[in-house]
Amino acid sequence: MMELQSLQYGSSTIEYELSFQERKTLGIKVYPDCTVKVLAPLDSNSDKIESKVKEKARWIIKQQNEFLSYHPLTPPRKFINGETHLYLGRQYRLKVEIGNKNEVKLYRGRLIVTQKPESNTEQILNDWYRQKAVIHFRETLEKVFPKFTKYKIDFPELSIRIMPTRWGSCTPQGKVILNPELIKAPKGSIEYVIVHELCHLIEHNHTSAFYNLQEKMLPDWKKWKEVLEHSLV
């Protein structure tokens, strides 16, 4: 049986899923999508549960902030001729042309958008980025996943979703969610985010065990994290 609960800690509201199980101690887990789950013994007192969650509130918020510590920084674009746009870490100069169909091409440092007169440049380009993201993210996931097979996790379902405050996330059910904006980052940074999320399928929180695993899977992850944080400005 699962119950939705919440408590106030300073200016923050902590929402959590409370489940009762056959166990001896109370456990609290914070997942990469910032959800909180509390697992309590069957005979637990509700006041004691809330007291324990409140005792761990600072740690819970710290964990959630850790999961939100890297986020997209790309400023708004106007989608006009001459404007620069990124793709896989390289800058391209936008050129908009009127034509009989909607399409996007890369040619000699230019991002050429051909569109019908009534079409929207931003929508065409966003659709193109999403299509490229689906292909490249899947290829990268298939490339790095074999390193994780010994940890007995299933190949994750991949979902592409705009997220205002993060590049990637994953769910307790094993789904990896990636921001299509990530396709603008260098390939190494994309691999870093995917490795980061795969590590979270094994180690849910940012513990030393998590960072040791990430270091093992991608020794130069710090380099690509820094590139990611500074390349999409």
Image (tube, rainbow, N blue to C red):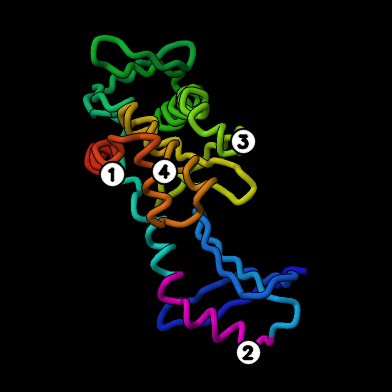
Q: Which residue is mark 3?
A: 157
Q: Earlier in the sequence, mark 3 or mark 2?
A: 2
Q: Please state which of the two labelled residues, at mark 1 or mark 4, is closer to the viewer.
A: 4
Q: Which residue is mark 4?
A: 213
Examine the structure image and report whether residue 54 is included in the region drawn in magenta. Answer: yes
Q: Amino acid at mark 2?
A: Asp
CA gap, disc 4 and disc 2: 37 Å
Q: Amino acid at mark 1?
A: Pro
Q: Is residue 140 above or below residue 206?
A: above
Q: Which residues are magenta?
A: 45-60
Examine the structure image and report whether residue 53 is included in the region drawn in magenta. Answer: yes
Q: Position of residue 222 (x, y in %)?
A: 27, 41
- Which is nearer the eye, 186 or 101? 186
Q: Position of residue 190 (x, y in %)?
A: 38, 32
Q: Amino acid at mark 3?
A: Glu
- Which is nearer the eye, 199 or 103? 199
Residue at left offset 55%, top offset 64%: 29
Q: Position of residue 138 (x, y in %)?
A: 52, 26
Q: Earlier in the sequence, mark 2 or mark 1?
A: 2
Does the residue at mark 1 contact the one at mark 4 (Cβ under 8 Å)? no
**In screen coordinates, is 117 left or right of 175?**
left
Q: Earlier in the sequence, mark 3 or mark 1?
A: 1
Label number found at residue 191: none
Residue at left offset 43%, top offset 37%: 195
The part of the image, by quadrant, that contains residue 193 is top left
Q: Is residue 48 visible?
A: yes
Q: Which residue is mark 2?
A: 47
Q: Earlier in the sequence, mark 1 or mark 4?
A: 1
Q: Which residue is mark 1?
A: 75
**In screen coordinates, is 152 left or right of 81?**
right
